[in-house]
Image (cartoon, rainbow, N blue to C red):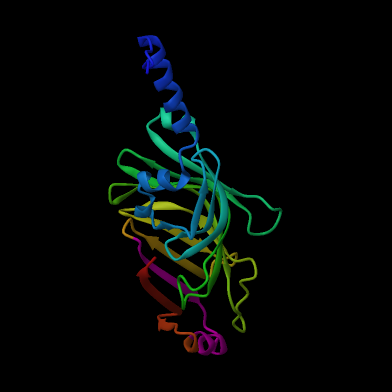
C-alpha cells in the first residue's frame, strides 16, 4: 500500500486549514472557561454555539440573574490583548441588555453595558428591585477598582407612606479605593444609597433617608431602618 507523501508547502497548508477550522468552531463554553470569567462571578445553566456566535442560557453575575443572551468574542479586542465577550438581548422589551464581559492582563470587568439588571433579593432587605445601566464600564485591576464610568438608576421595590421614589435613585459609578461605588440619590436629594462592591464579590449597601415625619420614621423602622440623627439608615452587607 502506498503512503501519502505531502510536500512541505502542502503540510503547512493542511495545518493552517486545521487550525482555521479549530478557531472557527471553537466552543463558547470552553472559551469562557479559559478566560476565567468565574472570577467575576459569571455562571450559566447552559452555553451553546461557537466562540464567535454563541448563546448563554440563564447567565448569572454573582447572585444577579441576567437572563439568556447571545454572545460572541470580539476579534479586534484580541489584537489588543483582551478577551471581550459581547453580549446582547434585544427583544424590544424592558429587560433588553447589551454590553461586554472583558478579561485582560491583570484586569477583569464589564464594558459599555446598557440595560436592566433585575436584582431579586440580591441586596435584601434593601428595597431595590433592579438597576438600569447606561453605558457603564468598570474593571478591577488586581484586587483594586481600576476604572469606572457610566450612570446607574435604581428602581425601588415597595412603597412607604410619605416617601416618593417612583423615579428611583440615580448617580454615576466611580472607584472608591478598592471598591466600585454606586452613589445613588433621589430627585429630592433626601434619599441616598451608597453601594460598594469589592473584587471578591463582597458588598456593603447603605440607604439613608432624611426625614422628620413620625409616620415615615415608624414605617421605615418596621422595614429595618435605624435612626441616626435626623436620618433613617439601613445598612446591608453580604457577598454576591
Q: Position of residue 19 (x, y in %)?
A: 42, 27
Q: Position of residue 98 (x, y in %)?
A: 58, 48
Residue lying farthest to the left in this orientation: 142
Q: Nearer the viewer, residue 31 or 223?
A: 31
Confirm whether the magenta stretch covers residue 134: no
Which residue is rendered at x = 61% and y = 71% of the image? 165
Lateral position of residue 124 relative to residue 107, left or right: right
Q: Nearer the viewer, residue 118 or 135?
A: 118
Confirm whether the magenta stretch covers residue 210: yes
- Above or below, comparing residue 163 to residue 137 in the picture: below
**Quarter in which the C terminus is drawn:** bottom left
Q: Nearer the viewer, residue 45 or 206?
A: 45
Magenta residues (range)? 201-220
- Above or below, comparing residue 93 to residue 20 in the picture: below
Which residue is rendered at x = 50% and y = 32% of the image? 24
- Asked whether residue 147 is in view, the answer is no
**Quarter in which the N terminus is drawn:** top left
Which residue is rendered at x = 52% and y = 49% of the image? 48
- Asked whether residue 81 is in view, the answer is yes
Amino acid at each position: 500500500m502506498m503512503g501519502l507523501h505531502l510536500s512541505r508547502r502542502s503540510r503547512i497548508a493542511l495545518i493552517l486549514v486545521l487550525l482555521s477550522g479549530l478557531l472557527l468552531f471553537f466552543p463558547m463554553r470552553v472559551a469562557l472557561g479559559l478566560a476565567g470569567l468565574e472570577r467575576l462571578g459569571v455562571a450559566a445553566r447552559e452555553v451553546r454555539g461557537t466562540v464567535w456566535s454563541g448563546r448563554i442560557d440563564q447567565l448569572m453575575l454573582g447572585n444577579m440573574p441576567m437572563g439568556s443572551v447571545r454572545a460572541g468574542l470580539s476579534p479586534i479586542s484580541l489584537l489588543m490583548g483582551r478577551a471581550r465577550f459581547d453580549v446582547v438581548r434585544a427583544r424590544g422589551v424592558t429587560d433588553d441588555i447589551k454590553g461586554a464581559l472583558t478579561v485582560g492582563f491583570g484586569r477583569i470587568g464589564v464594558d459599555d453595558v446598557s440595560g436592566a439588571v433585575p436584582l431579586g433579593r440580591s441586596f435584601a432587605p434593601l428595597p431595590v428591585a433592579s438597576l438600569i445601566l447606561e453605558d457603564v464600564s468598570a474593571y478591577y485591576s488586581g484586587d483594586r477598582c481600576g476604572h469606572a464610568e457610566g450612570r446607574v438608576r435604581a428602581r425601588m421595590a415597595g412603597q412607604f407612606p410619605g416617601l416618593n421614589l417612583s423615579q428611583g435613585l440615580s448617580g454615576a459609578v466611580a472607584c472608591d479605593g478598592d471598591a466600585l461605588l454606586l452613589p445613588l440619590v433621589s430627585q429630592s436629594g433626601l434619599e441616598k444609597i451608597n453601594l460598594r462592591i469589592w473584587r471578591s464579590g463582597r458588598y456593603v449597601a447603605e440607604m439613608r433617608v432624611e426625614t422628620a415625619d413620625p409616620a415615615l420614621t415608624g414605617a421605615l423602622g418596621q422595614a429595618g431602618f435605624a435612626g441616626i440623627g435626623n436620618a433613617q439608615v439601613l445598612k446591608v452587607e453580604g457577598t454576591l
